[in-house]
């Protein structure tokens, strides 16, 4: 048997719950850095003797890095939701996840997204809705937690079945309203744009009907539009009702459909139009803005849906596995003219590989002058394995800067701006990095402007490869 890649066991194993008031640190932190980085991701890929099958499975775990007085504290905790507590009680995987479905054989009953037995393992991202902190999943069950203790505080069921069954985990925030797209599966399915002002009241703004709903992990937002990029990875909803296989395996890649961009007026809900484009797949929109008669949509794109297959754990356990390169594309959508004559075009903004992209959302969301994107990346000279560098791309000229260290695997880089900044990249970039040689992780603090290491705080265990997080000044 081939040896496992060095990142596999520490990155896709199990985590204990730990608390440390002060992590050992080298370098120094900026004096203004006094908030908290909260991160979400899987806390274990194993329950009893069973293993999850895919990077997007696993039981949710929150991580918390608090900064103050030049020091960093750390704590992590499983979300003690149904998926976690029932798994602990029975010693087996209890709920169906993205690509793992143990439920049929376990209980002899049909599971589906129409059933109340869907997972509440909200492990993908997190956000703040009014004054509540919420862990988000693609299923409509969102879990509120206390950002100080990481204890689960309740289930926020603002997405009931009447609303829809699947949601993106990347809501947008603008002028006190949180926007998200929820897919409601039915004979005629709908993509539904919701606005949430305040903490609980969500309003349907507009919707687009479809007979073959697509897998959409994020969407775009500009000054006037919600941009629903309908990748041709689609499902016949009857297959989700029958639930013969895990969720994502019900979807089919149908490139002949192309990738249309649907535009909804986000103020009135009016369906503005459909602009066709060649087929591609993406998880993450980056930024979008209106410029003259065009809508500009930046997105991390792949030629097809092969990136989903690349994240099955048996593939990631292969010594020669390669993850498809995510490509930062700038799509231009004509806003004028008859629908049938409009077509999306794109240019590639950088030759670097990008995934888990971030930028200065607070100041530059929907802003044409934005310049820098930060992302996890793959070093072209070390092509095999998992994401092994961090990259900063200047979208104006395509130049990139990288942070790379052998045997190190950085997660999503979160930009935190200096409070009084005048330059877009005046701040730091925070990334949880697995040091496979040391068998543990560290929190990397990069100076965002020079993209050089400013500090690192050693975490006393290897943090499993997570997905998304955010920095909050107020915690
Ligand atoms: Fe995501």
Image: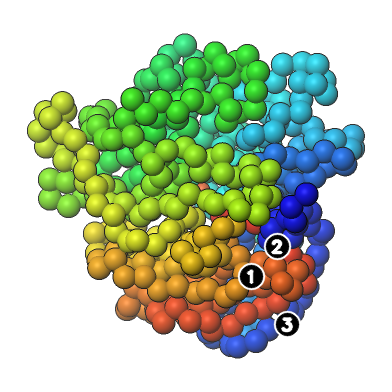
Q: CA distance from mark 3 to mark 2?
A: 24 Å
Mark 2 touching mark 1, by CB under 8 A?
yes
The answer to whether the residue labelled 3 contacts the one labelled 2, judged by CB atoms less than 8 Å apart, is no
User: Of circles 3 and 1, which is in front?
Assistant: 1
Separation of residues labelled 3 and 1 (CA atoms): 20 Å
Depth check: 343 or 29 in front? 343
Q: Earlier in the sequence, mark 3 or mark 2?
A: 2
Q: Residue at x 74, y 60 (%)?
A: 10
Closer to us: 115 or 278: 278
Residue placed under numbered mark 3 in the picture: 24
Between residue 237 and residue 146, name the one nearer to us. 237
Q: Is residue 212 above or below residue 39?
A: above
Residue holding disc 1? 407
Read off the residue under disc 2: 6
| Camera-nearest label, 3 or 2 | 2
The image quadrant that residue 211 belongs to is top left
Q: Give the image location of residue 22, x and y in percent.
A: 74, 79
Circle nearer the N terminus (2, 1): 2
Residue 335 in picture, x, y percent from top left: 16, 39
Specify whether 139 is left or right of 450. right
Q: Residue at x 89, y 34 (%)?
A: 90
Question: What's the mark number on residue 371?
Answer: none
Identify the secondary structure beneath mark 3: loop
Which quadrant would residue 385 be assigned to in this image? bottom right
Q: For residue 309, say whether it is visible.
A: yes
In terms of secondary structure, where does tag 2 sit?
loop
Instruction: Determine if the C-beta at disc 1 is less than 8 A from ligand 1.
Output: no
Above or below, 283 relative to 390: above
């Amino acid at each position: 048997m081939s040896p496992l890649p060095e990142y596999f066991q520490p990155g896709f194993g199990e985590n204990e719950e730990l608390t440390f008031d002060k992590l050992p640190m080298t370098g120094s932190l900026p004096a203004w850095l006094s908030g908290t980085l909260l991160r979400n991701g899987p806390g274990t890929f194993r329950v009893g003797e069973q293993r999850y099958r895919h990077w997007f499975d696993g039981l949710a775990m929150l991580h918390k890095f608090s900064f103050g007085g030049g020091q960093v504290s750390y704590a992590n905790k499983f979300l003690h939701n149904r998926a976690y507590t029932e798994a602990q009680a029975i010693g087996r995987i209890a709920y169906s996840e993205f690509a793992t479905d143990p439920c049929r054989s376990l209980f002899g009953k049909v599971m589906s997204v129409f059933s109340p037995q869907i997972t509440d393992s909200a492990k993908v991202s997190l956000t703040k809705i009014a004054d509540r902190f919420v862990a988000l999943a693609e299923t409509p069950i969102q879990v509120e937690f206390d950002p100080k203790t990481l204890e689960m505080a309740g289930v926020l069921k603002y997405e009931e079945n009447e609303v829809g069954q699947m949601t993106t985990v990347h809501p947008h925030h603008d002028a006190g309203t949180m926007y998200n797209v929820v897919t409601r599966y039915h004979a005629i399915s709908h993509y539904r744009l919701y606005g949430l002002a305040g903490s609980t009241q969500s309003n349907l703004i507009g919707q687009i009907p479809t007979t073959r709903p697509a897998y959409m992990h994020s969407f775009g937002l500009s000054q006037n539009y919600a941009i629903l990029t309908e990748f041709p990875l689609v499902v016949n909803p009857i297959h989700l009702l029958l639930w013969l296989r895990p969720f994502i395996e019900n979807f089919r890649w149908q490139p002949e459909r192309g990738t249309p961009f649907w535009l909804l007026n986000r103020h009135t809900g009016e369906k503005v139009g459909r602009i066709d484009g060649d087929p591609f797949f993406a998880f993450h929109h980056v930024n979008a803005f209106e410029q003259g008669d065009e809508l500009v949509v930046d997105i991390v794109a792949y030629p097809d849906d092969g990136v989903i297959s690349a994240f099955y754990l048996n593939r990631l356990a292969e010594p020669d596995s390669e993850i498809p390169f995510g490509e930062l594309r700038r799509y231009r959508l004509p806003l004028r003219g008859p629908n049938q004559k409009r077509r999306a075009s794109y240019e590639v903004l950088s030759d670097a590989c990008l995934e888990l992209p971030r930028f200065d959302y607070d100041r530059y969301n929907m802003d044409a002058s934005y310049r820098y994107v930060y992302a996890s990346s793959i070093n072209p000279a070390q092509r095999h394995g998992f994401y092994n560098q961090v990259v900063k791309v200047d979208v104006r000229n395509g130049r990139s800067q990288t942070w790379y260290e052998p045997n190190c695997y950085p997660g999503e880089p979160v930009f935190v701006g200096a409070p009084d900044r005048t330059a877009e990249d005046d701040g730091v970039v925070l990334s949880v990095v697995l040091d496979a040689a040391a068998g543990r992780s560290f929190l990397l603090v990069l100076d965002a402007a020079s993209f050089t290491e400013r500090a690192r705080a050693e975490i006393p265990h290897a943090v499993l490869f997570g997905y998304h997080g955010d920095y909050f000044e107020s915690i």
